[in-house]
Image (spheres, helix red, strand yellow):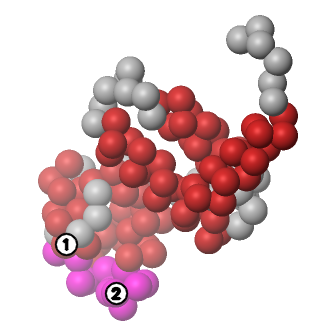
Amino acid sequence: MNSPIDLKNCLQEWNHFRSVTGIAPIGGEEHYQHMTDLLDALLADAGGDENHPVMPLVDIVGNLIADYEATLPAMPETTGVDALRFLMEQHCLTQRDLPEVGSQGVVSEVLSGKRELNVRQIRALSKRFAVSPATFV
């Protein structure tokens, strides 16, 4: 790497590469989606091989994505109870509509924080709402 850099040629090649790939600091949601799609394609091509020739490009694209995500507002902390309340609202459900949790009294205790969801309830809610069990943890 001690040879002189042909900057003119390098910039021509870079501009061509950038125009083909879109690799540049991310400037918005559409570009972000493009870059995450590109990262997915690169990772699929590498097939889990850490020594695959595409891995340095994976690092570059991953860093650009991480830099962009660091500029986004942080997601608020939520609990499993918050998720349950949200899903109840979205599905227009009352406490009586959740037999997976138990009686209306049990649901009330869960929603008020007096009782935690158990594993059986979490599994049932996860299945009912087609979400990950982690949603309720």
Taking 120 as reference, is 96 above or below it?
below
Give the image location of residue 113, x and y in percent: 45, 57
* Residue type indicated by callout 1: Arg
Q: Earlier in the sequence, mark 1 or mark 2?
A: 2
**Residue positioned 28% across, 36% down in the render:** 47
Q: Which residue is mark 1?
A: 128
Above or below — where is 128 with respect to 117? below
**Which residue was labeled with disc 2?**
91
The region drawn magenta spans: 88-99
Q: Residue at x 58, y 55 (%)?
A: 21
Decide which of 110, 7 is in the foreground and name it.
Answer: 7
On the image, which quarter does residue 6 sit in?
top right
Residues under numbered marks 1 and 2 in contact, where contact means CB atoms less than 8 Å apart: no
Q: Position of residue 104 (x, y in %)?
A: 26, 77
- Give the residue drawn at x 79%, y 43%: 11
Distance of label 1 from label 2 (alpha carbons): 11 Å
